[in-house]
Amino acid sequence: MLSFLLAAAALAPANAPAAHGADTFTLKAAHLRLYGNKVVDGGVVKVEKGKVTYAGDAKGAGELGPDVIEHAGWASAGLVAARTWSGLGGEGLEPKRPFTAEARAADVVALGHADFARARAEGITTMVVALSPANVASGITTVVKTDGETTLARDGHLQLGLSSQALRTNRFPTSYTAAIELIEAELAKPTGVWERVSEGKLSVYLDALSRDEIQRAVALASEHKLTGALLRAPLAGELAGEIKKAGLAVVVGPFGPGEEARVLASVAALGRERVPVAFGLESPTSPEALLRVSAAMCVRAGLDPAQAWEGLTTTAASVAGVGARVGKLAAGCDADIVLWSGDPLQLTSKVEGVFIGGVQHESKGGAGHGGAH
Amino acid sequence: MRRTTRYALLPASWGAAGPGASALLAIPSLVAFGIAALPSLVLGDEPAATPKDLFIRAEQLHVRPGRVLERGMLWVHEGQIVAVGTDIKLPEGAVVIEGKVVCAGFIDSWSAFALEPNAQFDDRAGPATRAVDAVDSYVDVRHERALLAAGITSVRLQPTVGARAGGVGAVLRLHPSKSFAETTVIADACSATAIGVSRGDGRALDVFERVSAVDRVIGAIADGHAYLVETNEYRHELADWEKKIADKQKELDDGFKKAKKDREKAQTEAKDKGNEFKDKEYKEDKKPKAPRFDEEKEIYARIAAGELPLVVEVHRALELRALLAGTKRFDRLRLVVAGASEAAQCAELLAERRIPVIVWPVPMGVQRAPEYRGASLALAAELDHAGIEVLLGSGAMDPLASRDLPLLAALAVGHGLPRETALAALTTRPARVFDVADKLGTLELGRSADVLVLDGDPFAATTSVRYVLSAGELVVGEVKK
C-alpha cells in the first residue's frame, strides 16, 4: 500500500547518498504537508539545484521534467529541533566558569557525528545545537543541518541560564540577583557578543525552569528588548500573557511517557495565547524520536495540531533564525524533504526517505537504522 | 468519597486542572471534620450520573479485535451491555451518544498507576506481597481522570519494578469515585519477577549475578512445585487418616453395647479375683504432619500449578534462553515474558511454547541502560510476525505513563505492528493472559460496559476520547438526559 517507488534508492546501501545523487528532480506525493494544517493531495515539489522551486498541487506545477520520484505516502519539510546537544560529545558542558559568552557551539560541534545521522533517520533535518544550562552565559548556539556538512548559522543565539542550575554554592554567582546583575552589567557596556545582543542583531535563548525563573527571564528580556525564546520553561503556559507581551517564543520538551499533565497543559495554553512554540531535544541524552512524540503528547493534551506541526517545522525554524531557508515546503526554500508512510504528525507514520538540499540521505530500507529510537 | 476528599485537600498551588478544584478548596475543613453529608458538593466535579439506558452509535464498532461492525450500535442498560448489532431499535428514553470508533476500554498490561510511591521501587517485597496492598487509595483523582480520558479503563499493577520479587499483581478498573476495593477485577492476576534489570536497585548486574538470577527463578518454581507435591501428598494422607479414624470410630460405635458388656464383665472378674482392673489401651494412629506453611512457596506452588501466570521481566537473549530452557519441565507453568528487548533472537522458542510477551514500545535513545541495548520499536512487529502473542504495556516506570499507552501503541504500529493486533494487545490479550477475559476486553453481551467512544483512529495523536464508560458508568464526557 505504501509502496515507495524508488527502485534505485532502495537498492542503495543504507545511509549513503542514493544513486539519484542529482539535486534536481520532481517529487510527486499522494499527500503533501506544506505548512501548518495545509495539506495538498496529489502534490508536487520541484527541486532545482537543492532548492525548492515549486510546492503545491499538480495543476500549478507545469512541466515535471525527466527525473520524477513518486511517493505513495506523505511528504513534508524536514523537521527542525529548536534545541539539542547533538554532536557536542560533552563539549557543551563548562562546569566551572559562569560566563563563557564567547564560547561557540560551532567551534566544537562535529557535523559528521552519529548523533546527526540518528536525528536524520527520525526526519529531523535541521537542529539548533545549544549548550549546557549550567552557566549564566553559556555561549553561542549554532544552527546546523543533519547532512553531516552544512552549517546554517554559526551564531544562532546567546544562551543565558536563568535557572537554579546556573547557580552554585561554590562559585559566584550564588543567587538569582547576582546573576541578573552580572548580565545587566554586560548589557550596560556591551562588548563582543553582548553588543550584538543589545543591538538586537543576535537573539537569546533564556533557560528557565520554575515559575519565578520564567518571570525573571521575561522581565529581563522586556527590560533590555531582547528577542528570542525561553528554553524548557515547563510552566510557561501559566504566564502565557506576559511571554506574549515580551514577544518571546518558547522552546519546549522533550517530553516522554508519563510527563506531568500540568506541563503538557502549559504547552496547550501557550498555543491558545498564540505564543510561538517550538519543540526541542536533549540528544543524545534523550532519544531523537521524542521530538515527534513530544508534539503528539501535546496534541493529546489540547495543543492545536497545526501549531504542533509548526512547532516541529516553521516556528522552530524561525526561532532558530533560519525561517527563510527551512521549515516549510515553498519556492525558494532548501529542498529538505522527508517522505513518510502517513501523516507525519501521527506516530503511526514512519520516515521512508530524507532529502537534504535535494540530496537523498535516507531511504525506506535505511530509515530507522543505527538504533535511533 | 474518600479519594474525593483527598482531592479537596490538595494545596491550591498544585492545580489548574479541574475546574471544580478551586471551589472544593473552600470546604476541606468540613470534610476533615467528617461531615460526609455533602456528596453533591464534594462530588461537584463528578460527571453527571449515567443514564439508565445509553445507546451508542458508531461508524465502526469493534466488538472485539477482528469483529468490526460498520455503523454498529450498542445498548447499555443499567451498566450492562444488553444488545450489540447493526439494527437495534432505539429503546424508549435512551440517551444517544455517537462516535466514529467505539471499542472496549484499554488495559495497560504493565502499569504503576496508583501504586503508593514507596511501593513502586521497594525491593524488600517478597513473592507474597500483594499489589492490592500497595495501592494508594488516596491517589490523585486528576491522574485517574487523565488515564480514563486517554482511554485506559483498567491496569495490571505490580509493585516493586525490577525487583527480585514483584509480588502478586492485580487488575483494577479505573473509576474516579469508587474505591479500588470496589474496582478490583482480580486481586491475584499473576506473580512477577525480574532478571538482569538494573533499574530496581540502580546497579547494572554483572553476568554472574544475572545467570544466578535465572537459577533463582527456576529454583523458586521448583521449590513451589515440590511444595505443591508435598501439600497434595499431605492432603491425601490426611484424608486417608481421617477415613481410618472415622472407620474405627464407627466400629467402636457399632460394637458399643458388646464392648460395654465385655468391660463390665472384665471389671467383675478382676474384682472377684482381687486383681486390679486396667482399661484396654488403644494405639492411636499418628496424624500426618502438615508441611510447614511458607507463604512464598504457596505462591510459587500456585505458579507451578498454572493457577497464577508468572510475569518475568527479562531483556537479554542469554537470560531469556536460560529461563526458557530451565522452565521447560514445568508443563503447567504459564510464563509471560515482559520487556524482552532481545526476544526476537528467541522468537521461535517463544512461539513454540506459546509464551505471551509484554512489549514496552518506548523510544530509548543511545544512553540507555545496558539491558535495553537490543531494544527496538520494531520488536512488537517482529514478535507478532513470528507468531507470538504480543501485549503492550507502558513499562511501569512512571504512574502517569499509562496515559500515553495509546501513543506508544501508535509507535509500535508505525514500526509494523498491524492495527488490529495492537488493538488486541490493549484489550482481549491482557484480559486473557490475566484471567479476566470474562469481564474485560470486549463489547460482548452481558458484560459490564467498559467502552470508549472516540472521534477517530484510536492510535492517532489527533483523536480525542469523547466518552468513556467504566464498569457501566460514564466517567468521561457528559450527556444530556
Image (cartoon, coloured by chain):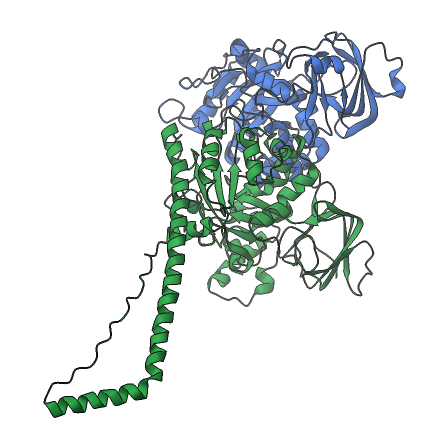
Quadrant of the rendered structure where residue A277 is?
A: top right
Whether A340 is drawn above or below B427: the answer is above
How far across and down, in percent of the image, does residue A177 sit?
44, 28
Q: In this view, does A190 lie to the left or right of A38?
A: left
Front-most of residues B332 and A364: B332
Q: Is residue A251 left or right of residue B318?
A: right
Whether B224 is drawn above or below A50: the answer is below
Q: In which quarter of the image is the N terminus of chain A?
A: top right
Front-most of residues B140 and A12: A12
Q: Quadrant of the C terminus of chain A?
A: top right
Chain corresponding to blue in the figure: A
Whether B268 is drawn above or below B354: the answer is below
Does the rendering let one see residue A302?
no
Front-most of residues B102 and B23: B102
Residue at figure coordinates x 49%, y 18% from the top left: A138
Q: In this view, does A138 lie to the left or right of A316?
A: left
Q: Colour of chain B?
A: green
